[in-house]
Amino acid sequence: MDVIKGLAGYVGENLGLLAPVDQAWQPTDFLPDLSAEDWAERLTKFRESAASLSDDVLVVLVGNMVTEEALPNYAISLNQIVKDATGTGDAPWARWLRGWTAEENRHGDLLNAYLRLTGRVAMRRVEQTIHHLISQGFNPLRGGFDPNSEGDAYAGLIYASFQERATRISHANVARLAVAQGDDALARICRRIAGDEARHESFYTNVVGRVMERDPEGGVLAFRALLRGVIAMPGRQMADGRTPDLYDRFAAVSQRLGAYTARDYARIIGHLVGVWRIADLSLSGKAARAQDYLCRQAGRYELYADEVAAALTGGPAVPFAWIRPGSRGPIGRAGDIGDNAA
């Protein structure tokens, strides 16, 4: 915590990665104006574009939206590092957390409104999933991470670096899929969200880079502890009250479409190991062993990426109660059985 407190000045220098509120985009900017005289025509055009999307793309979009809507859990987790007891502190860390939370909050709001207006998903099922995920809470440091071990304060920052890059990749890939399937409005939405994630990724990656300079042993040990348990995705505990393996089903569709894959996971590890110059750190003892472990992980996951992909996507089609009955897109695999599940 002394190292993190000592980074306050650097955090202050990076507050420019947050957009000024009066210049920031808002969800309304990307949705049909329902107050306009021709609102019905605008909404009809909007829904016609969304009708071209496959059910599989909708499944990935819902999963991404649910993850974004669970923002309160992530803010609570990071406040353990920021330690803004009043929620109104003026310290750089506190200002960053509030600004980051405000920017991230728009993502869930926008995707939620988009999905609702398309008329293609069972919104009550989706809302139940969001409710379950937030009420169950989420501890990103569970798994192989021992909260009593070295660097526990660093782990949340490392985790955020990983997840901001992962969400940027996923949203950008959904934008690509939306273009291919004829929904330019969704593509624009996902590109804008991915742009936010890129700025947030820069912040957390920069801060952890400073941690690695000031306390390389603690930083490396925290990074290894996270990877030993496999980094849990933020939506890992999503539930709809009826499907015990909901996240696994979502992950399989995401893998099949190429929205977020096992190879992406491997490449994010390789990117972070490279940008933090892990291989160049001068370490000894257990920290050196952790360093060696980290430098091998990207290659290890790349080696097994095809095997993981086959395991995730090789099974039969599975139901998604998120998909509204009768909603079928050009791929349709999820929707084919979603009709029976809703």
Image (cartoon, rainbow, N blue to C red):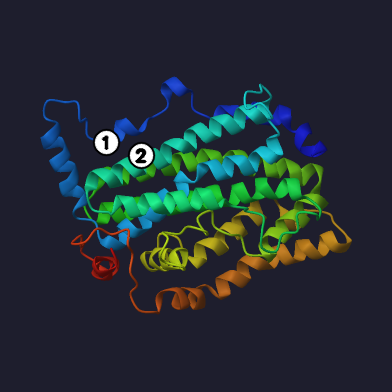
* Neighbours of disc 1 within 10 Å: few (<14), some (14-19), many (20+): some
**Front one among 285 and 328:** 328
- Disc number for residue 110: 2
Judged from the image, the secondary structure of the residue bearing numbered disc 2 is: helix
Classify residue 333 as left or right of residue 275: left
| Amino acid residing under circle 1 | Leu
- Disc number for residue 31: 1
Classify residue 36 as left or right of residue 95: left
Q: Residue furthest right?
A: 285
Q: Closer to the N terminus: mark 1 or mark 2?
A: 1
| Amino acid residing under circle 2 | Leu
**Observer able to see residue 64:** no
Q: What's the residue at 49%, 42% (across, down)?
A: 197
Estimate the x, y position of residue 117 in percent, counting from the top left. Answer: 24, 43
Tell me which corner region of the image, top left, top right, bottom left or bottom right, holds residue 250: bottom left
Tell me which corner region of the image, top left, top right, bottom left or bottom right, holds residue 246: bottom left
Q: What's the residue at 60%, 31% (across, down)?
A: 96
Estimate the x, y position of residue 99 in percent, counting from the top left. Answer: 55, 30
| Dots 1, 2 in contact, CB < 8 A | yes
